[in-house]
Amino acid sequence: MEGRFYLKIPALNGDTLLGLCDTGGGYTAIYPKTVGRLKMDSKIAHVTIKNETTDYILTQEIYDNPVIPKPKLNPYFRAYEQNSFFEVADQATSSSFTTYIPHDVFLGQFFFIGHAWIFDYQAGKIMINAPLGENSGDKNIQKLSFKREKSGNKQFAHPRMSLSVDGDKVDMLFDTGASFILSEAGKVGLGTSRSSVAGSFIAKSIFDTWRQRHPDWRVLEKGELTGSDLIEVPQVQIGTLVAGPVWFASRDDEVWRRMASSMDKPVKGAIGGSFLQYFKVQIDYNNDLIRFEK
């Protein structure tokens, strides 16, 4: 099971762009090689804020499709640009990422905000305009939390949710793009030839606790190319539903403390395709709700 979603976007020039769906991603971006392929270098605009320049292309120059939404603006740029746009990603940092996970555009948090989505992992389908109603009797519907402006409007679109592992409640980022870049040891341990697979992340302090409590849980030391370890959790619970096994990669606790800049409070990890693959997930950004269904 791939465990990740890609959206095919028909470009205005007749090309088709493959977009990686990453609800935990920071920005919405188009890669330099994609810009070159579309022959859109002349469409690149620039904005400089606090001596830092960002290159971008207006969404209306890339696609115009009534079914596929245009990304919302990051609040950081609202005083300088009022139209939806894709940042042009840095060549040096993006080339290696797209080598391991091939795609043309990166669909981050601001692509998904303002809409209701279904990620049906079992059927391999993604759908939009599927709002959720709050049903107090449905234990598999959970209220999401977001970082907000003083006005009450969402400042960022990183959803915080909770699930249960080993009897403990853990706050997580809902992260459809969470991925492992595997080392050779990781490939062998997971029984795959792929360089990258869908994953989930957990704070190192919790990773270490799991390992101490459960020496029988499988651990792949240096399973990621970065040297991070992987651990296989037999089962994870969300509402009344249980699924597993679920692989997590260790991430320093400081990573999650820094997430407070785009979330209402720090989380302890990110739940991605290694868990989501078992479900049909419905997420409604307007009503701040998420529902899991098997």
Image (cartoon, rainbow, N blue to C red):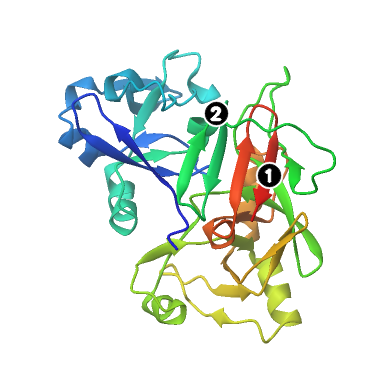
Q: On the image, numbered disc 1 is attached to which residue?
A: 291
**Image-quadrant location for residue 226:** bottom left
Is 7 rendered above or below residue 77? below
Is 273 rendered above or below residue 66? below
Q: Is residue 121 in view?
A: yes
* Direction right: furthest residue: 137
Name the amino acid type tagged 2: Asn
Q: Is residue 262 in view?
A: no
Q: Quick one: SS at disc 2?
A: loop
Q: CA distance from mark 2 to mark 1?
A: 15 Å
The crowding category of the residue bearing disc 2, from other C-alpha atoms within 10 Å (few below 14, some 14 to 19, many at least 20), is few
**Image-quadrant location for residue 288:** top right
The crowding category of the residue bearing disc 1, from other C-alpha atoms within 10 Å (few below 14, some 14 to 19, many at least 20), is many
Q: On the image, numbered disc 2 is attached to which residue?
A: 129
Looking at the figure, which quarter contains the C terminus? bottom right
What residue do we see at 23% from left, 38% from top? 34
Q: Quick one: SS at disc 1?
A: strand
What residue do we see at 28% from left, 38% from top? 17
Is 66 rendered above or below residue 173? above
Q: Between 24 and 55, which is closer to the camera in this rendering?
A: 24
Name the amino acid type tagged 1: Arg
Q: Is residue 107 left or right of residue 115?
A: left
Residue 48, labelled with which disc? none
Looking at the figure, which quarter contains the N terminus? bottom left
Residue 207 screen position, x and y as percent = 66, 70
What residue do we see at 46% from left, 77% from top? 190
